[in-house]
Amino acid sequence: MKTDDVMESASAVADEVQALRREIHAHPELGLHNPETQQRIVAALGGLPLEVRTGTACTSVVADLAGPDDGPTLLLRADTDALPMTEDTDVEFRSTIDGRAHACGHDAHVAMLVGAAKVLCDRRDQLPGPVRFMFQPGEEGFGGADVMMSEGVLEGVDRAFAIHITPNIPSGFVSCRPGPIMASADTFHVKVTGRGGHASTPHFCVDPIPAAAAMISGVQTVVAREMDPFNPALVTVANVHAGTTTNVTPETAVFEGTIRAVSESVRADVHAALERMCRHVGQAHRCEVDFEIQAGYPVTINHAEDVARVSRLVHEAIGENRYFELPTPVMGAEDFSYVLQVVPGAMALLGVCPDDIANSLEAPSCHSNRMRLNEDALATGVALHCAVALSG
């Protein structure tokens, strides 16, 4: 199928893509309930030869574009939700809602996929098979992909593809890798209980703070001394709380954080090692320990054949020097991982470093209150979606 002119087709819808992205950016919504974003997507798809339906368990949108019945069905996915944080940029279309911001680029994901739908509808006679457009809320910790899967979004799907923007790659460049591309994400929660009392009489107390401090130090030892350094894991203690004043030994100390891994075996090993260490350290300090892990997204694992296809298509359709293989996985997490557990496919990263930042490594990253992106790269994302769909 012809893919060498998709950049031209993508550029033709670039203004519409930018306008939609800015409208969504200014009106961010959280979690699984994104009704205004859903309405904007449905309106943007209006008049196209698509079968559009909305979800019941969340404000999702699924749009099917018919192709040859005997061809493979490709799913293209974009996430729609924002983050519960304040945006500190000076762009004219900044968030109009305090405490909500599209600081992870999902507004761009939606706009690029709508643009791809418009281009592919014009070229539907070139499609090797049907295309399903998946607009998914609740990626930021709510498992919206899993919710949509329970409503049948993967029924009949043979392959899947998604793009995630990043300001920390030069604008217009695409990166991918076979195997794990993003980490699993779990949280751990530890409550250490001793016996409170006056801070001047520690012998009458069982102080939970030294126990918690030893556990926090031990967390790093678990990673550094029990895990294979060539199969990495990351554990971060992000919240610690104990006590209320200066002359009282508290009864409890609490700490919690995140666990990241790029293989399911290491993920399980870290879970077991952390619990063992915390319980034994607590016992040594005469404290009781409540230890809980809340499982989050699994490892996002790209399929090698689909990554090779992305590499080839970038060279053919985007530019000969616009692709590079990501050397290591990213320790962030994605619920597109659920999709790739069921059907083969890949997620690629699209660079959107702003023009006024010389070094992409210095650009405010996704989830930064100052994150911005280069909208010129959105046409590249549209073109890549279309090239994947037209390639068969």
Image (tube, helix red, strand yellow):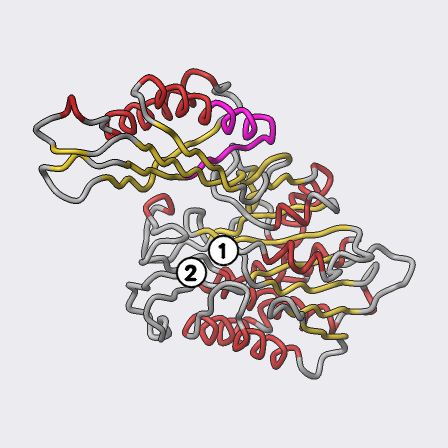
Q: Position of residue 125 (x, y in %)?
A: 83, 69
Which element type, helix, strand or loop, lies under badge 1?
loop
Q: Which residue is at 58% across, 68% downward?
A: 11
Q: Position of residue 320 (x, y in %)?
A: 60, 46
Quadrant containing the N terminus is bottom right
Q: Where does the magenta region start and end?
A: 258-273
Marks counted in the figure total: 2
Q: Which residue is at 62% across, 53% downward?
A: 162
> Which residue is more in the foreground, 293 or 224?
293
Q: Which residue is at 36% across, 57% downward?
A: 371
Q: Position of residue 319 (x, y in %)?
A: 59, 51
Residue at numbered disc 1: 140
Q: Are marks 1 and 2 in contact (CB under 8 Å)?
A: yes
Residue at numbered disc 2: 83
Which element type, helix, strand or loop, lies under badge 2?
loop
The 10 Å Cα crowd at callout 2, few under 14, some 14 to 19, many 20 or more, is many
Q: Which residue is at 71% across, 52% downward?
A: 160
273 relative position to 178: left or right: left
> Which residue is more in the foreground, 356 or 284?
284
Going by the numbered disc 2, the residue's amino acid type is: Leu
Could you tell which of marks 1 and 2 lies nearer the N-terminus? 2
219 relative position to 311: left or right: left
Going by the numbered disc 1, the residue's amino acid type is: Glu
> Which residue is more in the foreground, 215 or 80?
215
The part of the image, by quadrant, that contains residue 109 is bottom right
171 relative position to 110: left or right: left
- Asked if residue 159 is positioned above or below residue 61 in the image, the reply reads above
